Image (cartoon, grey):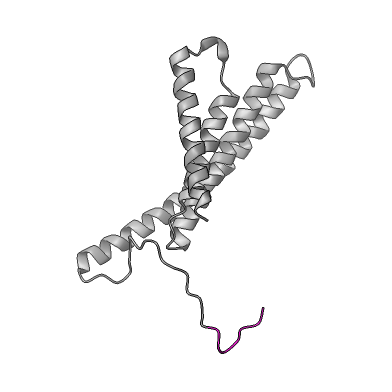
């Protein structure tokens, strides 16, 4: 779509600006710089966690493939493998949250809720029904329901 001279530029609406580079107080301005640096450091550390998690997935797959019965998985092994994969995917989601927080002035509420949904989905996937009490199961169900409804309501706004 070509830009027409008569069409005004659409500037994205800023929903928040917690750490402005310009602030009337020099101390607050310096503190904002420190916080932005800390967030960038968190992003670097999260990439290291993701790499470590991928290596862990490789290790888990390797050990499960070579343990008796050779090249076969038991149901418990599959849950362990799924859990390892989900941890890495959750770490990737958290990294995306950090990157969006750094790169835009839009708070990624829907992505944060989706990350929480993924984390609780991981819990449900690796859940051992034999060891979970009814209260814990109801609490997990309530969290899943609350996050699902919240995700739907936030998405409905778009």
How many marks on residues? 0
Q: Residue at x 56, y 45 (%)?
A: 92
Q: Residue at x 78, y 19 (%)?
A: 72
Let me know if residue 127 appears in the view: yes
Q: Position of residue 12 (x, y in %)?
A: 47, 69
Q: Which residues are magenta?
A: 1-7
Tell me which secondary structure the magenta stretch mostly adopts: loop
**Nearer to the camera, 12 or 24:** 12
**Nearer to the camera, 16 or 76:** 16
In the rendered image, the vertical position of residue 105 relative to residue 88, given as above or below: below
In the rendered image, the vertical position of residue 79 relative to residue 23, given as above or below: above
Query: Is 12 situated left or right of 82 in this image?
Result: left
In which quadrant is the N terminus drawn? bottom right
Q: Residue furthest right?
A: 71
Q: Position of residue 158 (x, y in %)?
A: 52, 56
Q: Residue at x 44, y 23 (%)?
A: 139
In the rendered image, the vertical position of residue 149 relative to residue 138, given as above or below: below
Q: Position of residue 5 (x, y in %)?
A: 57, 89
**Nearer to the camera, 4 or 127:** 4
Q: Residue at x 33, y 66 (%)?
A: 20
Query: Is 29 situated left or right of 139 in this image?
Result: left
Q: Residue furthest bottom?
A: 5
Q: Position of residue 117 (x, y in %)?
A: 52, 37
In the rendered image, the vertical position of residue 77 relative to residue 29, given as above or below: above
Is 39 included in the stretch rendered in magenta? no
Q: Residue furthest top?
A: 130
Let me know if residue 48 appears in the view: no
């Amino acid at each position: 779509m070509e830009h027409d001279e008569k069409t005004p530029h659409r500037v994205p609406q800023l929903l928040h600006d917690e750490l402005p580079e310009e602030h009337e107080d020099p101390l607050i301005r310096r503190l904002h710089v420190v916080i932005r640096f800390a967030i960038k450091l968190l992003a670097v550390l999260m990439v290291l966690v993701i790499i470590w998690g991928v290596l862990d997935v490789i290790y888990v797959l390797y050990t499960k493939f070579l343990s008796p019965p050779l090249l076969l998985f038991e149901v418990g092994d599959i849950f362990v493998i799924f859990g390892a994969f989900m941890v890495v995917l959750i770490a990737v989601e958290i990294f995306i949250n950090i990157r969006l927080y750094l790169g835009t002035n839009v708070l990624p509420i829907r992505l944060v809720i989706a990350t929480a949904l993924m984390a609780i989905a991981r819990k449900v996937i690796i859940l051992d029904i034999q060891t979970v009490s009814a209260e814990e199961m109801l609490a997990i169900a309530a969290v899943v329901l609350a996050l699902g409804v919240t995700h739907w309501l936030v998405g409905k706004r778009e």
